[in-house]
Amino acid sequence: MATKGHNEVKESLREMTRIFRPSDPKKFVKEYVRKYHIMGGYEEELTLVVENEMGKLNSSAS
């Protein structure tokens, strides 16, 4: 995956995480990958992006 496209996917996923605040990051990423036809092999990395963003949201809400 190209760097530019990869960064766009990560930023999109961060925004969607802020909007939807998923309870299960793995399931959220799996649905995102399926819906937006992201190439396989990136689920683990994208799950980390969602988990990090959820951590930021939880710490700022406190």
Image: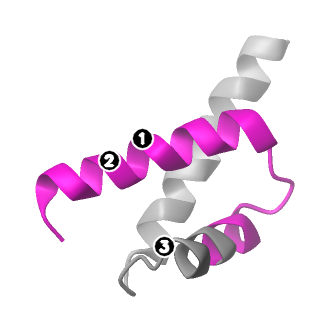
Q: Earlier in the sequence, mark 2 or mark 3?
A: 2
Q: Secondary structure at mark 3?
A: helix
Colour scheme in use:
one colour
**Front of the two marks 2 and 3:** 2
Q: Tell me: residue 22, above or below residue 14.
A: below
- Say which residue appears at 13% left-offset and 55% top-offset: 3
User: Which residue bears the numbered disc 1?
Assistant: 11
Q: Tell me: residue 51, above or below residue 46.
A: above
Report whether residue 4 is seen. Answer: yes
What type is the residue that disc 1 sits on?
Glu
What type is the residue that disc 3 sits on?
Glu
Marks 2/1 in contact by CB < 8 Å: the verdict is yes
Q: Which mark is residue 44?
A: 3
6 left or right, relative to 9? left
Alpha carbons under labels 1 and 3: distance apart: 16 Å
Alpha carbons under labels 2 and 1: distance apart: 5 Å
**Front of the two marks 1 and 3:** 1
Which image quadrant for residue 41? bottom left
Label 2: how many Cα within 10 Å (few below 14, some 14–19, many 20+): few
- Say which residue appears at 48% left-offset and 62% top-offset: 46
Closest to the observer, 55 or 18: 18
**In x, y percent, where is residue 9?**
38, 54
**In x, y percent, where is residue 55?**
67, 34
Q: Tell me: residue 27, above or below residue 46.
A: below
Magenta segment range? 1-30
